[in-house]
Image: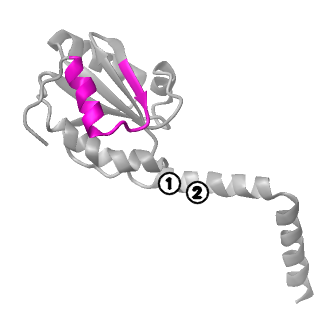
Amino acid sequence: MEVVEAWGGAALAFLQAHPVLVLTLLFLVYRKYQASRPWPDFGGRVRSVASAAEWEQILEAAAASGQVVVVDAYATWCPPCKQCAPLFARMSETFDEKSCLFAKCNVDVATDLARALAIRSMPTFKIFKQKKEVESVSGFPGEARLQEMLVKHGAQLTKKK
């Protein structure tokens, strides 16, 4: 019993002496746990991009066919990313796939692409036309604003939301 009390006292003393360290460790464990959970498939016509090389191929093909490309840079541990994921998937179905391509990039998996796109916060939405970034917004701007941005750059709506 004395051993338990000694360990309990030592643990309490450590917690009191290093609260920031303990909170940081708890956050890292939580983040690792969240990253291990599967990202739900919300449907829609959203292409997952796993690397910068794959991204370059997507941009080449989109430029050749005249498509506008919108990419959602997200992280599985990011609550706002999880909130806007089903909206982004639903929005992908409201645009003509010949005029607009929707893509997602997990910044913790495709780190090379996240660096190339200069992602600083999640979610970040970037719009490309003819392989050039034409617009970018950090945070979810809302369906109406994102739709307006896409239409402004040539994406065609197929049906109302």
Tag 1 secondary structure: helix
Front-lying residue, 138 or 74: 138
Residue 109's tag is none
Find residue 78 and report its horizontal and vertical position in percent: 48, 47
Q: Is residue 46 left or right of residue 140?
A: left
Q: Is residue 47 left or right of residue 157?
A: right
Residue 151 belongs to the span the image colors magenta: yes
Q: Please give the name of the residue rendered at 37% of the width and 50% of the height, measured from the top-left corner.
A: 83
Badge 1 is on which residue? 34
Q: Please give the name of the residue rendered at 36% of the width and 36% of the height, measured from the top-left corner.
A: 141
Instruction: Say if mark 2 contacts mark 1, CB within 8 Å.
Output: yes
Q: Please give the name of the residue rendered at 36% of the width and 19% of the height, measured from the top-left corner.
A: 135
Front-lying residue, 120 or 36: 120
Label 2 crowd (10 A; few <14 / some 14-19 / many >=20): few
How far, Cα to Cα, is label 2 from label 1? 6 Å
From what the image shows, is residue 31 above or below residue 109? Answer: below
- The three-letter code of the residue at mark 2 reads Tyr
- The three-letter code of the residue at mark 1 reads Gln
Q: Which corner quadrant holds the N terminus? A: bottom right
- The part of the chain drawn in magenta is 135-153
Badge 2 is on which residue? 30
Front-lying residue, 85 or 8: 85
Tag 2 secondary structure: helix
Quarter of the figure with residue 104:
top left
Q: Which corner quadrant holds the C terminus? A: top left
